[in-house]
Image (cartoon, grey):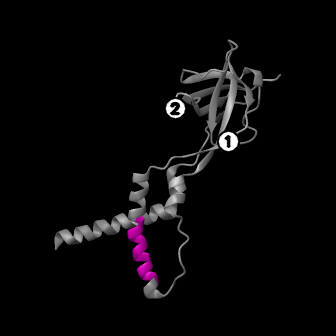
């Protein structure tokens, strides 16, 4: 059955829970996670304090080659995640479209599977609701799609460096207050 003819008549579900059958898993496309500039500046400033201390130690010990630090522009761009539009048909014959953000195992969803979706509206009313949780009633699987976050994009090394920088600044401030 050709489902492309239904593209003009698909609806965005208004409820939080939708129970329906999968009609079609459409081709996915990448979308970026937005990274807030104020948060990025605070993390980079705190990491810079620890970075300066690390460079000073490396210079004193002659240990070093340069670091592989990413640029501000690269960090601000944010990570990309996969968005897969999914068409569903409920028991009343209405066709709905929702978005799956992130990745699932390849065998998790198939056309004709009976699913119960927990949905969340996105900020833009033109975008279909985002799937938060999937209960595949055909196979009995509970699925949660996972996407990259701003924190995973920045990475543990930079975040640990930022925490160390905050601790150094707090120590300096405490010592200055005592003196």
Quadrant assignment for the N terminus: top right
Q: Where is mark 2, residue-wise?
A: 124
38 shown above or below 50: above
Task: Give the camera-side residue of 73 and 55.
Answer: 73
Q: Is residue 61 left or right of residue 24?
A: left
Whether residue 163 is visible: no
Q: Is residue 160 left or right of residue 179?
A: right
Label the magenta part by its dominant secondary structure.
helix
Task: Give the camera-side residue of 110 and 73.
Answer: 73
Where is residue 111? Give x, y as percent.
77, 28
Furthest toward the left, the residue is: 179
137 shown above or below 42: above
Q: Where is mark 1, residue-wise?
A: 29
SS for callout 2: loop
Q: Tell me the residue at 46%/61% (across/down).
A: 159
Q: Residues within 10 Å of mark 2 (few under 14, many from 20)?
A: few
């Amino acid at each position: 059955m050709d489902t492309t003819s239904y593209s003009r008549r698909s609806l965005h579900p208004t409820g939080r829970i939708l129970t329906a059958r999968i009609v079609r898993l459409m081709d996915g496309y990448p979308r970026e996670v937005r990274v807030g500039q104020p948060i990025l500046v605070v993390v980079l400033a705190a990491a810079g304090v620890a970075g300066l201390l690390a460079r000073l130690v490396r210079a004193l010990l002659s240990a070093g080659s340069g670091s592989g630090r990413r640029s501000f522009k690269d960090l601000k761009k944010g990570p990309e995640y996969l968005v897969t539009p999914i068409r569903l048909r409920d028991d009343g014959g209405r066709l709905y479209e929702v978005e799956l953000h992130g990745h699932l195992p390849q065998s998790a969803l198939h056309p004709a599977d009976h699913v119960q979706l927990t949905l969340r509206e996105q900020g833009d009313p033109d975008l279909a609701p985002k799937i938060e949780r999937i209960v595949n009633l055909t196979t009995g699987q509970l699925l949660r799609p996972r996407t990259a976050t701003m924190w995973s994009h920045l990475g543990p090394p930079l975040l640990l460096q930022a925490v160390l920088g905050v601790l150094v600044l707090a120590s300096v401030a405490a010592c200055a207050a005592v003196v």
